[in-house]
Structures are given as structure tokens and as C-alpha cells.
Image (cartoon, helix red, strand yellow):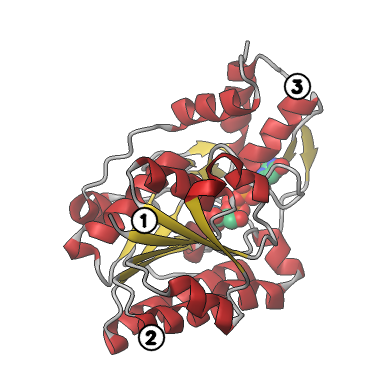
Amino acid sequence: MSLYLVTGGAGFVGSYLVRFLLDKGESVRVLDNFSTGKRENLDEVSSRVDLVEGDLNDPEAVAKAVRGVDFVLHEAAIPSVPRSIEKPMESHEANATGTLMLLQAAQAAGVGRLVYASSSSVYGANPELPKVETMRTQPLSPYAVAKLTAEHYCMVFHKLYGLETVALRYFNVFGPRQDPNSPYSGVVSRFIDAIVSDTPPTIHGDGEQTRDFTYVDNVAHANFAACHEAAAAGGVYNIGCQKRISVNELWNTMAELSGRHLEPKREPARSGDVPHSLADISAARRDLGLDPKIGVRDGLEKTLSFYIPSPQ
Ligand code: UD1
């Protein structure tokens, strides 16, 4: 049994990872400041989790959180491209400086490996598809800049200080417990909110922008493999399904699966929005042995049934 620290363990991806690890019989500690994470995300598992409440930028909290830890899964972040455009400094402090603080503490504590939740947003304006890890990054938002900066810090800590790090570039993750209640929430959770509240969803732009939507369980398997596969140390990997659908197709699928055929409201395209996104996952297949088990349609069914226990 190993001890895993999940930063942002009360958030959407983090709380899924906590359950995944507990199911495997591992020991889990969570570091969360509950800025975007929620206590109720850990409700049924809280008695089995060691919770350190604190901020990534609080050296004492971080030092306490990494003590005795074998693996760090670093999910804590302030997500959202539009939020970062409104508040770039907030995004930088949480996503870039916060990661540097964690890396220093993990290095000092002798952590075995740190797996960092990076983002497909780092590819930004680069028009080539699919996205390959060696491709030039062209961030389009402060969020993407901060995520890429932190990724570079991870690689430098590996090269200079010998701390094993792995960066996973998540491609539009969705699933249960993704907060639907903010205008900054991911599109799948916004569409679920529309279905549950029976109000029209909003589609930005013509809806023909595409994403490689990735069910959260695939991300959990990727994190576990990234901790344990020797070849992964110092690597950067796309985590997606290597399939893309448009936002219009996403809505049509969700409408069909839920039986709620609401007419979407059309709004202007968001600034900083990436037109198309698709992962090349050859590197993750090769080094992490990954083969995404749950495709977008199955993932959407699972997510819908979490919010609507018996969809029509
Ligand atoms: C981006 C990153 C993703 C990262 C996430 C963090 C890319 C390709 N992806 O996601 O890796 O994890 O930020 O927040 O850069 N939309 C609607 N209606 C809505 C909400 C969104 O039409 O109600 C549209 C958006 O304009 C966008 C798409 O849906 O084109 C996806 O938006 P969202 O779910 O917010 O994620 P990204 O910004 O793509």
C-alpha cells in the first residue's frame, strides 16, 4: 500500500481519483482549500481520507501535506479559460506559482513521483490536428500559459533536482461531480444543468468547434499508470480518446440520451476559444499502456445517470 496525496481532492477530477485509489486499497491524503472544490464531493469517503485543509501557496500546509507521501497527483487548480481572461493573476498564482510551491515541497520531502494535471489548452492556436506532444505550443489564454508554465517547472524539477515528474495533458474531461453551477463550468456540466433544470442550453459560436471529450475514468487510469510506469518519468502525455465531436453533436447526443430536446440559445463565440482539439494518444499507449476504455457516448450516459438516476 502506498500513500497518495491528491491536491484538489475535493474537486471534480480529484474526488474521482480519491475514490479510484481507495477502491484499489491505497492510502489517500487530500490537500484542498475548498475554493472551487466542495466538501460534499468527499462526503461518503471522508472517514477514509486524511484531509489537509490549506492553499498551495501556504508553505506550511503544503509541507504538512507532502510528508511521508509516495505519489502526488496534482489536480488543484483554478480552471476555466474565460475566468483566467478576467483574472489572469489569480490563474497564475494558483496554477503556476502553486505548482512551483508544491514541487519544492515534494522535492524536499523525498516524494517518489509527482503527476501533474496539465491541459490540452497549451496547444492553443496551433492549427495542426491531431495534437502531438512534440508540437509547438501556442497558448491562447492566461489559463493555458499558467498550465504550460507549471508543466515546464515539472520537467525542470525532473532534470535539475531528480524529482520524478509526469505531465498529463487532459483533453476536456467530463463526468460526475463536475460543478455545473458556474458560468465558467465545462460545457458537459452546463448542458447537464440545462437538462436538469429544463432550460435551454447555450451554444457559443456556431457550435462547430470540436473537442476530444474524455470521461474522467480514463483520466484516473492514466494517473495511476503515470505513477507506476518506469518509462513515464520526465514525460508529457496527451490524455484523450483520439476522437472529436462538435459542441452541436455533443448537445444532440445529450438531448437524445436524456430525452430533453431543448432548442439551444446561440451566443457569440468566446474569446480565447480554441477552434478544434483532438489528441494523438500514441505516446500514452506506448509508455503508459493506456487504451481509453470509455468513449464519449458511454461516458455521457454514465454522467447523465449520476444526475438523473433513471433517464428516459
Ligand atoms: C479548456 C481546455 C481544457 C481544460 C479546460 C479548463 C482546450 C481545447 N481545452 O476547455 O483542456 O481542461 O479549458 O477549464 O483548450 N461552450 C458552449 N456552451 C457552454 C459552455 C461552453 O458552447 O455553455 C463551448 C465553448 O465555447 C467551447 C466548448 O464548449 O468551445 C468547450 O468549452 P469548455 O467546456 O469551457 O472547455 P474548453 O474551454 O474547451
Which amino acid type is marked by label 3?
Leu
Residue drawn at 37 percent across, 81 percent down: 109
Q: Which numbered disc flags the more N-terminal residue, 1 or 3?
A: 1
Compared across the picture, whether 34 is left or right of 124 comes to: right
Which image quadrant: the N terminus? bottom left
Q: Residues within 10 Å of mark 3 (few under 14, many from 20)?
A: some
In percent of width and height, residue 288 lies at: 23, 53
Viewer-nearest residue: 1 or 245: 1
To which residue does mark 2 refer?
A: 108
Q: As displayed, is residue 190 above or below residue 154?
A: above
Question: Which-is-in-front pick, marks 1 and 2?
Answer: 2
Query: What is the number of the mark on residue 238?
Result: 1
Q: Which numbered disc flags the more N-terminal residue, 1 or 2?
A: 2
Residue drawn at 47 percent across, 60 percent down: 29
Mark 3 and mark 2: Cα distance apart in space? 54 Å
In percent of width and height, residue 179 lies at: 67, 45
Mark 1 and mark 2: Cα distance apart in space? 28 Å
Ligand 1 neighbours mark 2 (CB distance < 8 Å) = no
